[in-house]
């Protein structure tokens, strides 16, 4: 059974810092890995999708990498802003997704 | 991008009543829709997978007679929580999958059962 772990559970950084969120999974035979953002009481916004044949994806200040052999993915956020404050979830799978518990990010002005 | 809506966004009901939640794909047709449940400070847990025109497939531990799912068209799936009890209070989120691998999520429905 696939298990997804996200570390740290919470992170607080000053505005402008670069930061890295981590995601690990137990079954490396995944198809895709997807990073989401969730604001309090809201649904999920898809940030980046890395397909199994890819190693990374970039969108604006976000960069996600995938290392299937080690069962790890990282989400890099450059020049963090207060508006980036949210919970970030990673999920693996294709047809069905298995989610981690998320990392709650607070960017302090 | 693809947009998925849910209605209602929040609902409060008395114990023993039934509640219906709608999930719609607004600008695309979704052959598959998923229903998730999220308890406070927990991750999303898949409840069931529904394909248009066929019976939903439920995850282990999810009561199919309590959580009725209907996927009558390519743009609409409904989740009915029957005889709701306080322990059913949760955040319910649907997602829709189009051809390919990406899922698009709705804004969620907060259910509170008194």
Image: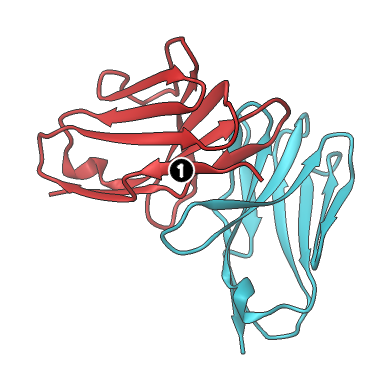
Chain colours: A cyan, B red
Q: Is residue B27 above or below residue B90?
A: above
B110 vs A30, left or right, is left
Q: Which residue is mark 1?
A: B5
B10 vs A71, left or right, is left
Q: Is residue B104 above or below residue B34?
A: below
Residue, far bottom: A109
Quadrant of the rendered structure where residue B41 is? Answer: bottom left
**Badge 1 element:** strand
Residue, far front: B27
Q: Is residue A26 above or below residue B78?
A: below
Report the residue at 25% width, 40% height from top.
B88
Q: Nearer the viewer, residue A60 or B92?
A: A60
Report the residue at 57% width, 26% height from top.
B30
B2 vs A18, left or right, is left
Report the residue at 46% width, 43% height from top.
B5
Horizontal and vertical percent position of residue A108: 60, 86
Horizontal and vertical percent position of residue B60: 42, 23
Horizontal and vertical percent position of residue A16: 75, 85
Horizontal and vertical percent position of residue B11: 23, 48
Quadrant of the rendered structure where residue B76 is? Answer: top left
Q: Nearer the viewer, residue B101 or A19?
A: B101
> Local crowd at mark 1 within 10 Å, few (<14), some, or many (≥20)?
many
Label tally: 1
Chain of the residue under label 1: B
Report the residue at 49% width, 48% height from top.
B43
């Amino acid at each position: 059974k696939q298990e997804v772990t996200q570390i740290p559970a919470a992170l607080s950084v000053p505005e402008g810092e670069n930061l890295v969120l981590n995601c690990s999974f137990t079954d490396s035979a995944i198809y895709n890995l997807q990073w989401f953002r969730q604001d309090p009481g809201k649904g999920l916004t898809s940030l980046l999708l890395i397909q199994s044949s890819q190693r990374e994806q970039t969108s604006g200040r976000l960069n996600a990498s995938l290392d299937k052999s080690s069962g790890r993915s990282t989400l890099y956020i450059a020049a963090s802003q207060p508006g980036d404050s949210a919970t970030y979830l990673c999920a693996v799978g294709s047809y069905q997704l298995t989610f981690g518990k998320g990392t709650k990010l607070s960017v302090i002005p | 991008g693809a947009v998925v809506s849910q209605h209602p966004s929040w609902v409060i009901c008395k114990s023993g009543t039934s509640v219906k939640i709608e999930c719609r794909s607004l600008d695309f047709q979704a052959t598959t829709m998923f229903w998730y449940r999220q308890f406070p400070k927990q991750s999303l847990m898949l409840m069931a997978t529904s394909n248009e025109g066929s019976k939903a497939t439920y995850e282990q531990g999810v009561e199919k007679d309590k959580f009725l799912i209907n996927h009558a068209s390519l743009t609409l799936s409904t989740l009915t929580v029957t005889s709701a009890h306080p322990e059913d209070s949760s955040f319910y989120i649907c997602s829709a999958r189009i051809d390919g691998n990406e899922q698009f999520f709705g804004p969620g429905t907060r259910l509170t059962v008194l």
